[in-house]
Image (tube, rainbow, N blue to C red):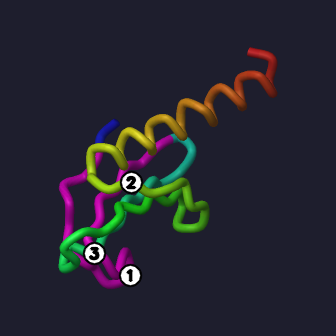
Amino acid sequence: MNWAEPKPPTEGISYYDHTICETPFGKLKIEWKSWKESDSYDVMLNDSDWVGAEYDLESAKELARNYLVKKHKELSELLGL
């Protein structure tokens, strides 16, 4: 997966530090509050579907990847592929 470099809060994109990955299912975004000593890394798909949260960026990326693998499998089964 090709994640963008982490970026600070950006008007119109995210109120928090974030990174984005474009996928065939839409835009995956990981957001976190870098000013907090210990914060979760929340994963969202298309700014509407909450995927889950982890406590470090690499684990959040793995959560996002596993989510896509699961969705791909569900879609393949639905289409009989």
Residue 23 x, y percent position in the rendering: 47, 43
Amino acid under label 3? Lys
Q: What's the residue at 29%, 59% (across, down)?
A: 19
Q: Which residue is mark 2?
A: 54
Q: Viewer-proximal residue, 22 or 64? A: 64
Q: Is residue 39 above or below residue 81?
A: below
Q: Say if the magenta span includes residue 12.
A: yes
Magenta residues (range):
3-23
Q: Quadrant of the C terminus?
A: top right
To which residue does mark 3 refer? Answer: 33
Q: CA distance from mark 3 to mark 1?
A: 17 Å
Give the answer, above or below, for where 54 lies relative to 34: above
Q: Nearer the viewer, mark 3 or mark 2?
A: 2
Res 42 → quadrant: bottom left
- Write down the quadrant of residue 20 in the picture: bottom left
Q: Nearer the viewer, mark 1 or mark 2?
A: 2
